[in-house]
Amino acid sequence: MDDWLRAWNEHDLDAIMEHFTEDVVFASPLAAQLIPSSKGVVRGKPALRVYWAEGLRRKPDLHFELKGIYEGVGIVVINYVNELGGRVCEVLEFTGELVSRGYGTYQS
């Protein structure tokens, strides 16, 4: 998880993308805001790159503070606080060593 956190905090999109399968599916309410045509579900690595590039462009001060990592069978949940103090969990499902499905969740 050190690589994941470093990549995000350095805004290194190439390093972020290395963690995902080509056919990744990522769902997030933020995706619906940044890429309205996605309706919150981004399909495929190229589309995921576009979504996160837009997010990084709009949030140049983006920074995550890791609060916890929870491991299951083929799943990891990452709990962090973003640059605005918002609590976030990402649920990541793996195929082998790479994320094939992900879900961004935000505290109400």
Image (cartoon, rainbow, N blue to C red):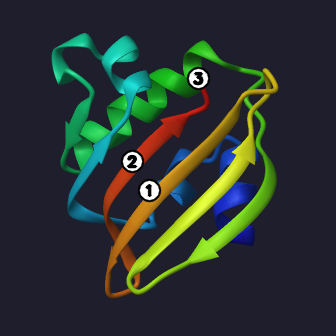
Circles 3 and 1, Cβ within 8 Å, touching? The answer is no
Circles 2 and 1, Cβ within 8 Å, touching? The answer is no
Residue appearing at x 58%, y 48% in the figure: 89
* 67 lies left or right of 36: right
Q: Which residue is mark 1?
A: 17
Residue 70, percent from left and from top? 62, 72
Quarter of the image that includes the C terminus: top right
Kind of element beneath mark 3: loop
Q: Amino acid at mark 3?
A: Ser
Q: Amino acid at mark 2?
A: Tyr
* 98 lies left or right of 95: right
Kind of element beneath mark 1: helix
User: Real-space Cα distance between discs 2 and 1?
Assistant: 15 Å
Quarter of the image that includes the N terminus: bottom right
* 93 lies left or right of 80: left
Residue appearing at x 57%, y 19% in the figure: 57
Q: Quadrant location of residue 88?
A: top right
Q: Which residue is mark 3?
A: 108
Residue appearing at x 27%, y 27% in the figure: 40
Label ID, residue 103: 2
Q: Amino acid at mark 1?
A: Met
* 76 lies left or right of 51: right
Residue 44, percent from left and from top? 19, 49
Labels 3, 1: front one: 3
Label ID, residue 72: none
- Residue closer to the observer: 53 or 40: 40
Labels 3, 2: front one: 3
Residue 36, percent from left and from top? 25, 12
Mark before the other along the chain sequence, 3 or 2: 2
Q: Is residue 37 above or below residue 67?
A: above
Mark before the other along the chain sequence, 2 or 1: 1
Residue appearing at x 73%, y 27% in the figure: 86
